[in-house]
Structure formats: C-alpha cells, structure tokens
Image: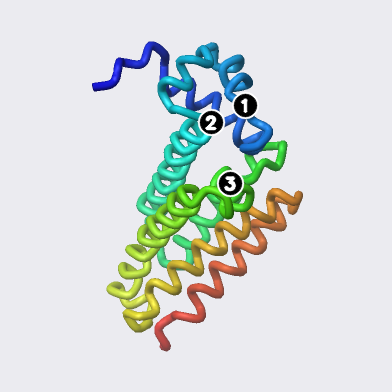
Amino acid sequence: MGRPRRFDERKLLDHAQEAFWVNGYDRTTIELVAEASGVGNGSIYAAYGSKLGLFLAVFARYCAGRVELVDSVVSAHRGDFESAVAHYLDEIVADCTSHPDLRGCLMLNSLAELGTRFPEVVTIGRTTLTAMEQVVARRVIEAVDDGELEIAETEIDPLSAHIVLVSQGLISLSRIGVSADELRGIASTSSRMSALLHARAA
C-alpha cells in the first residue's frame, strides 16, 4: 500500500494542467510544475514516477471533465433536436473562446503533439471521444423515439459522431483566431443541417 500523499493532489494537478495546456508537453518540466504548485520535485516523482506519469494523470482527468461537460450540456437541455444540437455547439463555442490566449483544447493539442509518441494518449483520447459520442447518441435516440428524426438504427452512431466532430472542429478553429461570432455561425448552420437532413418527412 502506497504512502499517503502529503500534498493537495487536486491543486497540484490544476497547476500541472495549466502548465501542460499553455506550454505543451515538451516545454513543461517537473521543476516548472513544482515551482507553480509549491510541491517538491521529489514528491511529484514519488507520486507519478515521471513527467509522463504526471501528464497522463492530468490528461485523463481533463478528458473525463470534457465528457462531463458534454453530458451536462446535452442532458440539461429541454427542447427539440435542432435546438439541442445548437445549444451543445453554442456551449462548446463559449467554452473554447473563454481563454484569450487561444489555447484550444488540451485533448486535441496533446493528440497532435504526442499521438505518435505515446499510445496511452491516443487510447485516452479515443475513449473520450467515444464517450462524448455516446452522450450525443442518447439524445439522437430520444429524437427518433419522439418522431423528430427518421433514421435507421445504423445511422445513429454516425450522426452522433458527426455532431461531436463539428464541436471538435469549432475548437480547432478557435485556436487559429476564428471569432466567436464566426464560430456561432458555423455551429448554427451545422445544427440546422443535422436536423433537416434527418427530419421526418411531413
């Protein structure tokens, strides 16, 4: 049984997440995290084994939080399918434009930076995207059951994956400086198309 940690793990991971998110993996050091968090280098190495171990703890927690965000946004919305998709994409735009430094998404950034080097990052990222798609798929199924959409069962997962893909594309566009208004316009068009292309014929 491991020794209890003598530091506030949540606080440490918060500081580590900020460092990895702003600087990227390669430019973040244990020393930088230690200085920001006030937790000694030795304690960090003892708890996580390496910089990669610390990063994976940060990354897994961040990705779980993204799934929770999608779930809370989709589950809390009451309205028709088109407005539900619009609400989801609008919340994603609000979230990804809340950082003035255009930092994008730690998950997407890390997949691009580390995906070919650390298979654990790809595994966590794929699991996260699948979980997001499953959340959206539940809303698609509700729309089918309510008669809003008429699609085959085999089309539910592709539609859900498409909606999540759009959300991730919006985040990527935000990182290169596309304005919030432009992103909302793209989101609005996408939500209308998602509903219209699959709407039950009158």
Quarter holding the C terminus? bottom left
Label 2–label 1 contact, CB within 8 A: yes
Q: Residue furthest left?
A: 1
Nearer to me, 197 or 61:
61
Question: Is residue 4 shown above or below 196?
Answer: above
What residue would you read off at disc 2? 51
Identity of the residue drawn at 67% across and 62% down: 185
Q: Amino acid at mark 2?
A: Lys
Q: Is residue 143 visible?
A: yes
Q: Nearer the viewer, mark 2 or mark 3?
A: 2
Q: Which mark is residue 110?
A: 3
Question: Is residue 187 shown above or below 104?
Answer: below
Q: Amino acid at mark 3?
A: Ser
Q: Residues within 10 Å of mark 3 (few under 14, many from 20)?
A: some
Q: How is the image coloured?
A: rainbow
Q: Amino acid at mark 1?
A: Thr
Identity of the residue drawn at 64% across and 57% down: 184
Nearer to me, 9 or 202:
9
What residue would you read off at disc 1? 29
